[in-house]
Image (cartoon, rainbow, N blue to C red):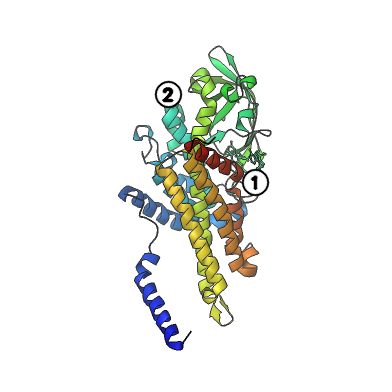
Amino acid sequence: MAAGALSKTTKTTASLLQCTKKIASRTFTTQLNEKQKEVQDLIRNFSNEHLKPHAAQLDRQGRFPFEQVKRLTDLGFMGACVDPEYGGLGHDYLSLAVAVEEISRGCASTGMLLSIHNFLFANLVNEKGTPEQKEVFLRDFTKGSIGCFALSEPDAGSDVANIRTTATRDGDHWILNGKKSWVTSAVEGSATVVFATFDPELKHKGIACFLVPLDYEGVFRGKKEPIMGVSVCDRAATACDLTLEEVRVPASYLVGQPGEGFKIAMGQLDQGRIGIAAHAVGIAQAALDTAINYAKERVAFGKNLTRLPSVKDRLTDMCIKVETARLLTYRAASDVCTKNSAMAKYVSGRNAAAVADHCVQILGGRGISTKYDAERHFRDARGTQIYGGVTDIQKRLVGHFLLKEHNAL
Ligand SMILES: Cc1cc2nc3c(=O)[nH]c(=O)nc-3n(C[C@H](O)[C@H](O)[C@H](O)COP(=O)(O)OP(=O)(O)OC[C@H]3O[C@@H](n4cnc5c(N)ncnc54)[C@H](O)[C@@H]3O)c2cc1C
């Protein structure tokens, strides 16, 4: 190419960059209405002030984020979508997804906790509970008590219809027996949703859904699970086994009808996936923030890393992955259905892991040093492809609904 042509190209590129400068510095807000943008601003500021500065220490020391939960309670976000009549804010799902994203950007552990408490516990009670259930399982739970969701079992994770915890009717009570695994926040929580079968032969049609206070006789919480990333033994959020031995639950704590448990679980998981997708977007954004800040300062071969084509390429790829995941997540939160939420979770989980991997690489040796944030983002990102339903299942769900839409099953 002639020198003149090159300088023309350079000028054109420069003016193109100039024109798009405004767009480039803009964060994603186009899908949000005024109220949702207010939530984004409020929680982003909260996260920068109260979460981000403490996230690494909470993770390292394995401290549960009690203080952070208290502050979120004061802001009303422990009942983000709950009717104001029961102490909630009455927000829509997209506002809650935005809040989970911003919180996870500051502290993934707090984001995970908030996501499950709201999307899988509080929203379930708010939408499916009787007035009595709402009195008992919402009022305190919008004021700081933590709720959980106990579906998985040692021998039934993805294979939900195969759960073995039993529910036996005894007069005006149900007796629950069995073991649940990986119940997020159960160590610190006050109540949980429990799914149990009253007739294993009926498979998914034999499942019922109950609300169970965790201080009931016969409820035993196991030890915190030692795993990488959020929800771990040595880290800020927690998950543990729950053993149920002859637990007597009032019949009035049954949600819906006895055979409706599977449908309730699946409906709630449509929301739960949006929560984990938003959580993954927040972790990915945090990894991108970390990488950009580092690359701007670090000099190699006489230039900042941002000027090295391979680093620029990685940052660009990270940006595209974050924005793609965010768009799908916001879309799923605005139009909740299994296909949308599974697609959002599939993409967000995979993208978060890839973005966090790039982040580690950009920080070089410091990327795997526990003194820097990159390795924490890496650990936090990986789990988002597992909890809330593994990536493989999300893909199957998308395929199933795609073919169903085309009458091709
Ligand atoms: C940190 C953490 C927190 C959690 N919190 C909760 C919680 O609060 N409440 C709760 O109920 N559960 C919770 N879980 C459980 C979580 O939802 C399950 O771990 C998850 O659904 C996968 O189940 P599993 O571990 O039994 O894996 P399995 O079901 O045994 O699957 C293992 C692997 O097998 C493959 N596989 C299995 N089935 C299929 C299939 N049909 N098609 C294709 N591939 C398949 C996939 O590769 C999958 O990754 C949590 C888990 C973790 C790690």
CA separation in Å, label 2 and label 1 = 35 Å
- Percent x, y for residue 325? 49, 53
Q: How crowded is mark 2: few (under 14 residues within 10 Å), some or many (20 or more)?
A: some
Q: In which quarter of the image is ligand 1?
A: top right
Q: Residues within 10 Å of mark 1 (few under 14, many from 20)?
A: many
**Label for residue 198?**
none
Look at discs 2 and 1 and give the one toward the viewer.
2
Check the image and report above or below for 405 versus 366. Answer: above
Check the image and report above or below for 101 versus 201. Answer: below
| Amino acid type assigned to the residue bearing label 2 in the image | Thr
Front-most of residues 352 and 118 = 352
Q: Is mark 1 on a helix, strand or loop?
A: loop
Residue, disc 2: 130
Front-most of residues 163 and 116 = 163
- Percent x, y for residue 45? 40, 56
Residue, disc 1: 233
- Percent x, y for residue 211? 52, 27
Placement of the C terminus among the 4 image quadrants: top right
| Amino acid type assigned to the residue bearing label 1 in the image | Cys
| Quarter assignment of residue 352 | bottom right
From this viewpoint, which residue is outermost toward the left?
34
Sequence order check, earlier mark of 2 and 1: 2
Task: Please indicate, yes or no, whether residue 227 appears anywhere in the rendered image.
Answer: yes
- Percent x, y for residue 85? 34, 32
Q: What element carries label 2?
A: loop
From this viewpoint, which residue is outermost toward the top?
171
